[in-house]
Image (cartoon, grey):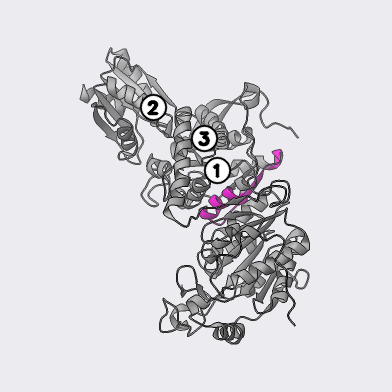
Amino acid sequence: MTVQTAMPKCWRAETKPHKFCPGCGHGLVLKALGQAIDELGIQDRAVFGCDIGCSLLAWDFFNIDTVQTHHGRTNPVMTGIKRANENLICIAYMGDGGGYAIGAGHLVNAAVRNEKITAILVNNTQYGMTGGQMSPTTLPGQKTETSPYGRDPKTTGMPMLGPEMIAAIGREGAYAARGTVDNIKQLKGFIKKALENQIAGNGFSFVEALSLCPTNWRTNNVESWKFLNEEMSKYYKVGEFLVPGSQNKEG
Amino acid sequence: MPDKPIQGEKRVFMTGNEVVAWAALAAKAEIMYGYPITPQNEIMHYWTRLAPKYERRFLQTEDELSAGFTTVGGVLAGRKAFTATAGPGNTLMQEPLSMAEAMRLPTVVVVTQRGGPSTATVIYSQQEVTMTTQGGNGEGLRIVYSPATHQELFDYTIKAFNTAWTYRWPTFVLGDGYQAKLREPLTIYDPEEKGIELVPAEPYLGKPGMPGIDRPPTHVRNTYSVEEELAEVLEEYFKEYNRIATEVAEYKAMYIDDADIVVVAHGVVARAAKMAVEELRKEGLKVGYFRPVTLMPMPVEAVKDVANKAKKLLIVESAQGQLDKLMKISAYGCTTEFDSLFKPGVGITSEDIYARVKELL
């Protein structure tokens, strides 16, 4: 018996089915986000910023005011909006390149300044939209279009641990977690907390979501879930890394 | 706490950077986002000191990319937002400004030109004309004012906000390092008391009502799937831009009707040009003066008029022909001769121009 989950109310029905690849994890992350928005009743105050890369396809995904930004620039655009109007609930949505490569400087500074925005980063271990190049989250030994013999940590370093970094440099009131598309209920819970944390004005709220990219991984459905659950989850621990009030953080 | 930063009119003695901060206040700018780079820095210094007194805001960002993109965000939220930069900062700004152009966002940017290419000098130039008028990838759909005096710097900074929010294009006040650091007397005023109606800002995102139910959701984008889709958008943009170009274009001219040589300059160099031309006229010489106040859009009709009358145009600029190119494009079809006095990244005095004109006569 499988329980049918309803399409989120804040989704825009006219643009469904969505434009993501078959098997892409973005649809699942955006479902978790949509459900969180519905449950919090914030559709009329939410503003959604999507990065370039696969996330750009979400520009008309919701019945929510949306701005398509530039690659890596979603955090500063949403910061600019939030600084200008605190009533808006600002959601920055990006991939692992937009967040951890070209936009890494913005991400670090948003965390250090404790911007009261929510950032959601989808981690599928490579640059999907441009055809599968290595990203900061490509696993050691993983083959991509620019590491065809497997990623060598000796020359490219170890993969980036984003929520752990945010937890290390984050300020009092900040939130950092990592979820997975293999546990939508938990992922939705993290996203909901990240939104509530922004609404409460506590601090920077960050969720990384482990995701799938069968197109560039060249995997079938069995292999896709296997890679996510056996390889990615081994290195990228799922859970909360920074919860407001749980640690002694200088303000 | 005074409600208005300037009551009536006030005679002051200020640097250009201070003038910009006061003009932005007078224009009811609400928030500045910025990152320091010489010679722009004191705009941020003055703004951060004045802002708390008048309930304005400021965010110092991590770089100029972020300064540009946060400004875009402030505008999307419906605020009169602005930023300021120079040189390599202006280079970085072209990325967020191409996004502003793509979305027709009324971002206001003050540029204090300095030497280039690269880090070069932190002092002065007119070498950011091409970059500021043309922008990043795309077509250069923007408005650029080139003020000459501190009074104009004040007047045109206020006007920049009005122009931006009226026509919805990124709008620039293109100054320079000499102007930024030079102290000069001027009159600051409350624009509304002078009958200047300030155009209000309004939000692009987060308007009242439930999106998808009470109103269509606002979806602002900069990505298109096929060539024809982009072409359709740009066709509308050009139609609108060309319509407003003649309304926006400004110039100043003097002694044009009988001039054999017309000296052409913009910004602070125009002051030297004007002085030189006045001196030459006193000697009974047929020399005129022309100055584009907007560099984008150029005052094309006025340029053609001058070019059709004069035997020769002498282009004077602290760059190697950046204004010259704009003039030649505008004068296309006219047969007048072009000559030049180019001093890239170096100031030009009225004596320099006087001597050059004498050589040509």
Q: Which residue is mark 3?
A: B16
Q: Residue B300 location in percent, x, y?
A: 37, 29
Report whether mark 1 lies on the same chain as mark 3: yes
Determine which quarter of the picture holds residue B190: top right
Q: Quadrant of the C terminus of chain B?
A: top left
Q: Name the front one of labels 2 and 3.
A: 2
Q: Residue B282 location in percent, x, y?
A: 32, 13
Q: Name the front one of labels 1 and 2.
A: 1
Q: Chain of mark 2?
A: B
Of residue B217 and residue B148, the one placed in the foreground of this image is B217
Residue B107, label in figure: 1
Q: Is residue B178 visible?
A: yes
- Identify the element where label 2 is drawn: strand
In the rendered view, tell whether residue B254 sits above or below residue B230. above
Of residue B308 and residue B127, the one placed in the foreground of this image is B308
Q: Which is more N-terminal, label 2 or label 1?
A: 1
Disc 1 crowd, CA 10 A, few/some/many (<14, 14-19, 20+) = many
Give, as a three-letter code, the residue at label 3. Answer: Gly
Q: Chain of mark 3?
A: B
Q: Residue A17 location in percent, x, y?
A: 60, 65
Determine which quarter of the picture holds residue A235: bottom right
Q: Which is more N-terminal, label 3 or label 2?
A: 3
Residue B303 left/right relative to A67: left
Q: Residue B208 location in percent, x, y?
A: 72, 46
Q: Quadrant of the N terminus of chain B?
A: top right
User: Marks 1 and 2: CB-CB under 8 Å?
Assistant: no
What residue lies at 46% left-to-right and 48% top-to-bottom? Answer: B90
Give, as a three-letter code, the residue at label 1. Answer: Thr
What residue lies at 21% left-to-right and 25% top-to-bottom? Answer: B359
Q: Which residues are magenta?
A: B52-73
In the rendered view, tell whether residue B5 sits above or below residue B52. above
Give, as a three-letter code, the residue at label 2. Answer: Arg
